Image: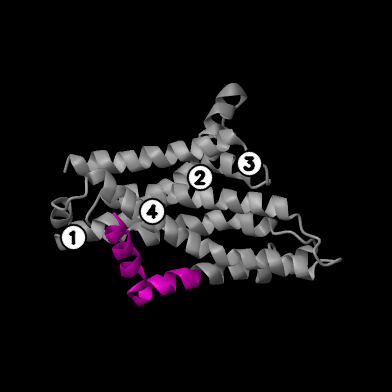
């Protein structure tokens, strides 16, 4: 598993595309947090990063499928998937190794945002006027939603041998899971609306982004990860 994990990491950073994707992600977040008028911290006037945690899932919807689209699809297109299946690794181990590589890339993408917390704390009046507990709670929620999107992206990549198709499917699934159920719940009322909204990733992410780690939200997102990784195994086992 370790060799496959390292192979995936090296493949991502072995081309200019990998660096370009991460650079675009950080530029997009930088524009959202510091430049765009409606979300700029400098215009908002408060020492918090609400805009960072509010808008990053939108960027994730495109970033993570772009990272994950090649995970399985490229192997199948190049004919190396059959070779990989003859290795000593089981199908479950292959999926886990590829998922852990994707998760590592997500963490590397999000890690620089910790500097935003330090910057806001320094710029605050007085300096240090930042709720660090709330910040790290929200940051943990961001990692959880990124981990969930990575599992969804891997599932999309297992459905096809075409990377572009895998990307489109990944974006569609992430969009539906994050926004779709919430939009549907808004059309309903009563208990039905509440239960449908609870199926939305945004419902649980918004709960975590308040800085309070609720075990129900954590277990829901872990469950979603398990479902999509399990789905990837089932699909590839039948092909």
On the image, numbered disc 4 is attached to which residue?
100
The quadrant of the picture occupied by the N terminus is bottom left
On the image, numbered disc 2 is attached to which residue?
178
Marker disc for residue 234 = none
Between 182 and 154, the residue placed more toward the observer is 154
Of the numbered discs 1 and 3, the one sitting upstream in the chain is 1
Between 203 and 218, the residue placed more toward the observer is 218
Q: Secondary structure at mark 2?
A: helix
Residue sitting at x 57%, y 67%: 112
Contact, CB < 8 Å: mark 1 with mark 4?
A: no
Contact, CB < 8 Å: mark 2 with mark 4?
A: no
Query: Distance between the Cα atoms at labels 2 and 4?
Result: 22 Å
Query: Distance between the Cα atoms at labels 1 and 4?
Result: 22 Å
Of the numbered discs 2 and 1, the one sitting upstream in the chain is 1
Query: Distance between the Cα atoms at labels 3 and 2?
Result: 19 Å
Q: In the picture provided, is 11 more to the left or to the right than 103?
A: left
Q: Residue 124 at what x, y percent from top left?
A: 81, 66
On the image, numbered disc 1 is attached to which residue?
77
Contact, CB < 8 Å: mark 3 with mark 2?
A: no
Of the numbered discs 1 and 4, the one sitting upstream in the chain is 1
Quadrant in the picture for residue 122: bottom right
**Of discs 1 and 3, which sits in the foreground?**
3
Q: In the picture provided, is 183 more to the left or to the right than 36?
A: left
Could one spot residue 102 in this view of the protein? Answer: yes
Q: Secondary structure at mark 3?
A: loop
On the image, numbered disc 3 is attached to which residue?
213
Query: Distance between the Cα atoms at labels 2 and 1?
Result: 29 Å
Q: In the picture provided, is 82 more to the left or to the right than 35?
A: left
**Of discs 3 and 2, which sits in the foreground?**
3
Are there few (<14), some (14-19), or many (20+) residues within 10 Å of tag 3? some
Are there few (<14), some (14-19), or many (20+) residues within 10 Å of tag 1? some
């Amino acid at each position: 598993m370790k060799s496959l994990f390292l192979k995936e990491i090296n493949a991502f950073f072995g081309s200019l595309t990998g660096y370009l994707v991460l650079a675009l992600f950080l530029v997009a977040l930088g524009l959202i947090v510091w430049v765009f008028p409606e979300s700029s911290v400098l215009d908002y006037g408060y020492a918090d990063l609400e805009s960072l945690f509010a808008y990053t899932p939108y960027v994730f919807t495109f970033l993570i499928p772009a990272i994950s689209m090649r995970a399985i699809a490229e192997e199948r297109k190049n004919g190396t998937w059959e070779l990989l299946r003859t290795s000593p690794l089981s199908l479950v181990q292959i999926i886990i190794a590829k998922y852990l590589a994707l998760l590592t890339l997500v963490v590397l993408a999000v890690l620089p945002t910790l500097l935003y917390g330090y910057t806001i704390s320094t710029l605050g009046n007085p300096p240090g006027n930042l709720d660090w507990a709330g910040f790290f709670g929200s940051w943990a929620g961001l990692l959880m939603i990124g981990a969930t999107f990575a599992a969804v992206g891997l599932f999309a990549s297992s459905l096809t041998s075409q990377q572009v198709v895998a990307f489109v499917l990944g974006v569609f699934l992430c969009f539906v899971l994050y926004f779709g159920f919430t939009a549907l719940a808004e059309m309903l009322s009563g208990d039905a609306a509440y239960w449908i909204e609870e199926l939305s990733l945004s419902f649980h992410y918004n709960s975590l982004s308040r800085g309070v780690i609720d075990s129900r939200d954590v277990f829901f997102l872990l469950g979603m990860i398990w479902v999509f990784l399990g789905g990837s195994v089932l699909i590839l086992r039948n092909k």
